[in-house]
Amino acid sequence: AAGMFLRLLSDIQWRAANPKWRRMTSSQRSTSTTAEPHPVSLPAQAQVVICGGGITGTSVAYHLSKMGWKDIVLLEQGRLAAGTTRFCAGIVSTARPVSIELKMAHYSNKLYQQLEQETGVPTGYTRTGSLSLAQTQDRLISLKRVASSLNVMGIPCEIITPKQALQLHPLINIHDLVGAMYVPEDALVTSANVSLALATAASRNGVQIHERTSVSHVTVHKGRVTGVETDRGRIQCQYFVNCAGQWAYELGHSGEEPVHIPLHACEHFYLLTHPLAEPLSSSLPTVVDPDGRIYVRNWQGGILSGGFEKNPKPLFTEGRNQLEIQNLQEDWDHFGPLLSSLLRRMPGLEALQILQLVNCPESFTPDMRCIMGESPTARGYFVLAGMNSAGISYGGGAGKYLAEWMVNGYPSDNVWPLDLKRFGTLQSSRTFLRHRVMEVMPLMCDLKVPRWDFQTGRQLRTSPLYDRLDAQGARWMEKHGFERVKYFVPPGKDLLDLDHSKTFYKPDWFDIVGAEVKCCKEAVCVIDMSSFTKFEISSTGDQALESLQYLFSNDLDVPVGHVVHTGMLNEKGGYENDCSIARLSKRSFFMISPTDQQVHCWAWLKNRLPDDSNLTLEDVTWKYTALNLIGPRAVDVLSELSYAPMTAEHFPSLFCKEMSVGYANGIRVMSITHTGEPGFVLYIPIEYALHVYNEVMNMGQKYGIRNAGYYALRSLRIEKFFAFWGQDLDAFTTPMECGREFQVKLEKGMEFVGQEALLEQKQNGVYKRFTMFILEDHDTDMDLWPWWGEPIFRNGRYVGKTTSSAYSYTLERHVCLGFVHNFDEKTGEELVVTTDFINQGEYEIDIAGQRFQAKAKLYPFSSLFAQRRRKDEVELSGYQRE
Amino acid sequence: FYLTPPQVNSILKANEYSFKVPEFDGKNVSSVLGFDSNQLPANAPIEDRRSAATCLQTRGMLLGVFDGHAGCACAQAVSERLFYYIAVSLLPHETLLEIENAVESGRALLPILQWHKHPNDYFSKEASKLYFNSLRTYWQELIDLNSGETTDVREALINAFKRLDNDISLEAQVGDPNSFLNYLVLRVAFSGATACVAHVDGIDLHIANTGDSRAMLGVQEEDGSWSAVNLSYDHNAQNEHEVERVKMEHPKSEEKSLVKQDRLLGLLMPFRAFGDVKFKWSIELQKRVIESGPDQLNDNEYTKFIPPNYYTPPYLTAEPEVIHHKLRPQDKFLVLATDGLWETMHRQDVARIVGEYLTGVHHQQPIAVGGYKVTLGQMHGLLTERRARISSVFEDQNAATHLIRHAVGNNEFGTVDHERLSKMLSLPEELARMYRDDITIIVVQFNSHVI
């Protein structure tokens, strides 16, 4: 019979324009009330033009109109919800590892649930719940971590046994399972109809929707959006929103001033079947089997099942001229492994009859997180795209955040992980994107362990010392395209290969990093920190100082040669950036910020510095190699190399001086280390980098110098309670909340951004407090390691999450940093957090469902600081409420 | 004894070579896209040779396979030298003059050929001066003969073949003061080699064949299926015309002794070949050369042995039969291979296997469900079967390797059987020759965009 079948198939020429899928969705289309069959002429102007009528575009329009903006035009090149949205599998799943994504999905779920009632458009919303299966213990751990986050968000979720899973879904084979996670409130929707419902509501609120209208490009004048050109004429507008899904990249590049939106489409396949002999219940939970790389939901009595294969097929790399979405081929050979996986999970489906294999392209981003926010180069140009195959789960929440961003200037939660400005032009190469998404798509199902790194698109930005460090055993990670050393593998020592080194427990580099830390404490280490973002701000008169005094919270009117740690705050007093600024001369400043600030900080300053030709801002990141000499003997190495006294009397902490090192002149030496250890950072013009490095290593030999990497640095800074922007600090955290009042000069004689908010906090107290936790009953060898995002419990009640963690080789304990809130027991309202509140609690940290006792501290261990410090650093212990 | 698939692959791929004609402005303007070649030895050392080169002073590309017998010396020499003879035969008078003047005045020589060689394909350094001098004498004669006419490729090929064989014969008669070289030229002359050479220039394809290697064109029919067109005739006892020719060239009295047991004089399989002076020289000449030759030659029973019924030499020629073919869009590839391949595979199968390989699995008819009733289980079974079938294709990046895999490993169902492959490849040296011959294959892929 099989042979017969084979012959039959080979006789048929399959046309992808099979009417079948049309039939499947046409009935749904007729319910649309917003589609205008004949084009109404476009308005000449509007406040907002949204491009894209899929789930993201309609969600943005819905939320903007709800928030009171009415003058909105939504343009769709084809029909509403006819692109990826139509083909989407319609699973609303909240089981997301990243907290902001989890919040978006949770909001979407609540939104869709009431959408039919609100709009009258049937959305097919069914609360089925979802089952995530674990075939391995490691997978179960990762599910338990997600479960912990869901529970503290108030989303019901349990870890269950395979037998319990079988009771929830009678078709699954549980023989190879070790456990599962059940999220009862996850739902299914008809995704096109959700989008149409959102459009209907938006339309009722005054949003004009025009189908069959393509945007050719967006016009920008003096860094602001002025309008859009379409195939049906021009619309003037102040805001443009690019919700063009997989075409967002091209649309971003179509204007004169390109907006880089790094995403790339991949083919994505799922299977539809006829109903089972006894049709499946529509309330049967969705099954996700990440180890088998598949998901399965009930669909019209049969199933819908797709997955994320190991060998994805990227498409549209050369642009959209090749194939229309509807003409994509089914590729059974490609789907084969996923089909095997499906039949292994549900052997009972063997006899189920195939309806169709759908090929639905999805767009993926370089870091698996979606892209939202405003362009760094064109004000008023907003983006929401790159949903990584979770458009339905995120669409509602993401649209809300973007609408808030446009209306209020910033969303109601920290969306930095999704901010367009986390990327620069460097992630915008088509080759890079093509290669990276081929790694990203399989990662949707791969186990994500702490500190995993992307393997594709590497070695793009490197320090001039890259080869030299690599030859000495450097192992690399990447930040904003820049290669940074994690640690150095000593000669003769082998580490596990990539796959085997994945662990939630003690990693194989534990002793290696320990030795590097020890050397930082007792002798001296060199860390290449060239990736940090470096700007120079200078002016002919006092403009630089005046502008910086306004934009930064600390007092920058310090004597020449001083270095100041300061926040760059927003109006609410939250950290937009945390940086060190050296005053090079009366009129010029050198600013060092975290690596991923390159685009964000640049845009922030550009938008706020006065338009004055006498004031210049320059990105000098690429001009300098930064070597961090850490340790008590750094001073000896440097004074021998420069014939200059480097002791604290001559070169106090937080000082900056240009000097010669070896033969090389003009090296900016700063007495900062980013770790709290004694030492210096050398900013070396790149052509001298190799020379200075060689000199330092030669001279350092007698002081026991060695190379070290960022893992050592991280352990050092965390055990000293140093917060890091992007990890611990964000736009919703103020200096007052993290014990850094000493870095704020409230009375510096002039106004600065965020001052008012900080004064108010000083008056009324803070609602969260950055706290250090020392894990007490945690066995480093045997227990799961903390990472970040672990829930913190105070007296058994959830009070916040950790933001970073590291093993302290000095304390021989794990240290977690995180924020403690004070939620009212009855109302859940946030109350003021006092020192007493912190100090009088019993704390536990939840790592994948297991709670460990932790000791809370508001001040670092003073015994960890070896050096005498300048006065303002002694105040590191920081802000204390009376 | 069992070879794992990676071990099998490393044996099969040891000699594989691929060449892609470089593109200009993203376009390949040549009628040749490139070629894949490979060899699998049965003899130790292998007696087959292969060559490929681009003519630099005229247009066109040369490709050839050479099957040696009684040692590899002759095949080696022909593989090094024949293309130079062909290229020189094709050169216009002015270019020949230019080259001769350059040599005369010690200036740098115009490059004549660009070779495309596998690292294992070697050229003998010691004989290069000797070979060069013979070649120079040839072009000097061509200069003197200047006919003023444009060179005809057919004629050039025939002249080159004959001239080289003549030079091989002369060099052996004259000898060389250097004893190593002296022995070398004798070994070249007393061993033999067949040659099958293709010259491709635009849509003009010429095949010059001497012996029993074979050239075959792969043609894709309108329905997508593959068929084979022979572009050479085997010169052996199975070819009636060949038997007829040999008989014509000798008196009627020898008719019975000329071809015995399907061999020339009961000894030689191919009816045309380079070298093999034992079938070309008079008995006197053979005796004289052997006696004056080095001891190694004297001690060799084979060289001393005079074929029976040897009355009216020469019995053997190196003159090729030339076939001209104008390439058509449906002509997708050319296979040149020594008899080791053709003994095991029918040309129709060769055409199909290479054709399917070159067009790739992705061009295979995709599976489609359409309106048929197909269950998940049936589909799963079908996909599994397809995967197994195409996995052998995916293992090879080289069409010649793929063909060798089939030639050696095919079972009675025409699919590669790993067990059989493993057995055939792990035969000890002395047994290998009994089960298979040396195989040498060149697969040339044509550029449909140009043709």
Image (tube, coloured by chain):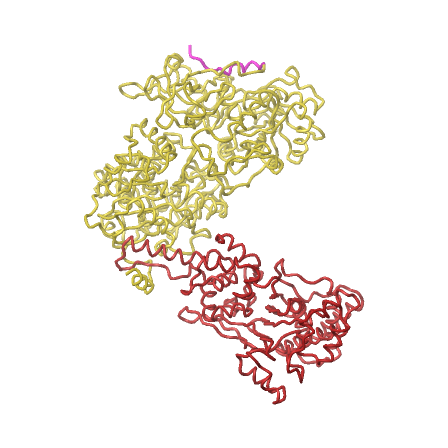
Q: Quadrant of residue B314?
A: bottom right
**In the image, residue A736 lies at what x, y percent?**
44, 18
- B404 is higher (above) or lower (below) than A623: below
Residue A871: within the magenta?
yes
**In the image, residue B253 lies at what x, y percent?**
62, 89
Q: Provide the residue span drawn in magenta.
A: A868-882
> Is any atom of residue B276 visible in this view?
yes
Left or right of residue A641, residue A483 in this image:
left
Q: Nearer the viewer, residue A423 or B266?
A: B266
Residue at the outermost left position: A278
Q: Nearer the viewer, residue A215 or B292?
A: B292
**In the image, residue A877 lies at what x, y percent?**
49, 15
Which chain is the one coloured yellow?
A: A
Which chain is the one coloured red?
A: B
Q: Nearer the viewer, residue A113 or B221?
A: B221
Figure label count: 0
Residue B171: within the magenta?
no
- In the rendered view of the protein, which quadrant contains the N terminus of chain A? bottom left
Q: Quadrant of residue A685?
A: top right
